[in-house]
Image (spheres, helix red, strand yellow):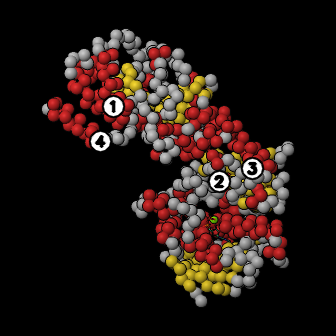
Amino acid sequence: MSESIPFRAEVSRLLDIVVHSLYSDKEVFLRELISNASDACDKLRYEALTQPELLTDDPDFKILIALDKKARTITVADNGIGMTRDELVDNLGTIARSGTAAFLDQVGTEAKPSLGQIGQFGVGFYAAFMVAQAVEVRARKAGSAESWVWESDGRGAFSVEETDKPTRGTEVILYLKQGEDEFLDIERLRHIIHKYADHIAISVMLEGEDTPANRAGALWLRPKNEITPDQYKEFYHHVGHAFDDSVLTIHWRAEGVIEYTGLLFIPSTKPFDLFDPKRQHGVKLYVKRVFITDHADGLVPPWLRFLRGVVDSEDLPLNVSREMLQNNPMLAKIRQGVTKRILSDLAKFAADTPDSYAKFWENFGAVLKEGLYESAEYRDELAKLLRCRSTSGDGLVSLTDYRGRMKEGQESIFYLCGESIEKLQRNPHLEGFKAKGVEVLLLIDQVDDFWPTTLGEFDGKPFKSVTRAGEDLGKIATSSDTKKEDPQPAAEGMGDLIALIKLTLGDSVKDVRTSDRLTSSPVCLTSDEGDLDIHLERFLAQHNQIRTASKRILEVNPKHPLLIQMAARAKESGAADHLKDVAWLLLDQARLLDGETLSDPIAFSDRLGALLVKAV
Ligand code: ADP
Ligand code: MG
């Protein structure tokens, strides 16, 4: 009995996008179906390692493509793992990736997302609906006696029904739309297979022919000089389930104590769920050309989870179970080799094509930075790959660049963490540094709160947040192009004013001091050497890691007209009463400038109100 099931909402929306906005490259439907058939054969080959009976009398994997000009159908059949009824429903009727709906909402209905963006959801199968008005999928799971047929016109619902497929595997039958007759031409299909499936390790046969239409060998085992850029590109699309281009292809063979071949790619698009804790890397593990798993946990470190591709090991035992892999010492060695290779190729990439590297960094830099505190052994290499914004301009700077521009007498690499570059640029902490021409790194990724402390130093110079007091800007030579300031004597009464503010604010601050880092703002908040960085502390508080924020030092700008005037009155009798509200308002102002929320907005508003009344 046929059962009709609606597509999940996300599927309908994705289908709509695939069919209506990605029509420029219709022929990719065949690439996607062949890619799926090849994956299905890979999966069965793995299962058959322990259950050889699954292959029965049909041990040679192949993909068969048949045409029926009269019925106007194309059939792509494989003798791979097949699907059960439930798998048909789940795999072809839902989108597994969490966050799909949220992403689609964000993209909106107007804008046309790129193929690269849409491709990440595993929409490969739905590409069939670009050329077909109806699609039938007949599947029989290897080892099962049942078979099922899935059918849909791609508009809202599909049906499933039991059928009588005599052999294991999956058959996808496309009923072509009007106007798609070009795909009924066998030479056209041969051309598409050659273009998109030459790198597929399994034979793709056109019905009635004896020789495969593709080369059918593991691409990664071919010598590099025999592989064309297009073949690499198509292999990336297949192995990475990707629709974008890769920015870097890394293909090598490790020989010696451990032997393996790696063919890895760095995508050009940033996946929407890059920071989802459940997100896994995309490197498939093969052992002697047999696919083992997409999810070998220890194969690459989490901070390289943007990689796509294949690692094929000669040494791991073929009967290694996926569960046992995790603690396998051989796998740890492979991970080490892969990581080193990637880091050294990234260094070359950065040196040879800094502009492309900068784009890579925009996509994946925040992930790579996790390695700075997660993997001590690669810290040095990672520090050299690091790029940051800074007060020196719009571009990205390396720590080596920064180091080369340090001023005479500058002992530390200064940085400031915050939410956005725009906000940081206006942060009062930077005033003194800017005035002296001292460069400050501006850090806005969440991981930036952690790595400077873990890394500790670069090339002998410690990292120091500019929010920490005690930074002797005075030690740093003023650059010749900025005016030398004469050391001015502190305004009269400044000492009294500081004492008065301290008395007024009491326990709300750790200390009150004059500042040499401020040029135009009257006040800012800082912390001492030993204290947590302000931004980090706020992050920890938000995540309930610490309960109370530690007290800050209020720094006041002794050259600011407001402070000078206050100082002049500090000695007058009744000054405390008079200046009390101003002192509190200065503290609140410093908090606001620092991006904090006020603990007592009502008191703030009362004081401001009182002052405004006087002013008016
Ligand atoms: P992806 O290949 O990126 O997972 P697809 O949309 O191409 O996404 O396919 C969705 C899922 O349907 C696959 O992950 C697989 O589980 C299943 N599938 C598709 N084609 C086949 C096939 N020929 N044999 C077995 N399973 C298949
Ligand atoms: Mg696919």
Q: Residues within 10 Å of mark 4 (few under 14, many from 20)?
A: few
Q: Which residue is identified by label 2?
A: 281
Secondary element type, mark 2: loop
Q: Is residue 597 left or right of residue 450?
A: left
Specify which label sits upstream in the sequence, 4 or 1. Answer: 1
Q: Amino acid at mark 1?
A: Leu
Q: Amino acid at mark 4?
A: Pro
Cα separation, mark 4 vs mark 3, equals 59 Å
In this view, the residue farthest toward the bottom is 1
Secondary element type, mark 4: helix
Specify which label sits upstream in the sequence, 1 or 2. Answer: 2
Q: Is residue 77 visible?
A: no
Q: Amino acid at mark 2?
A: His
Specify which label sits upstream in the sequence, 3 or 2. Answer: 3
Q: Which residue sits at x=65%, y=53%?
A: 281
Q: Which residue is identified by label 4?
A: 601
In this view, the residue farthest toward the left is 616
Specify which label sits upstream in the sequence, 2 or 4. Answer: 2
Say if 459 sits above or below 327 in the image: above
Q: Which residue is identified by label 1?
A: 587
Cα separation, mark 1 vs mark 2, equals 47 Å
Q: Which residue is identified by label 3?
A: 262
Q: Which residue sits at x=64%, y=42%?
A: 374
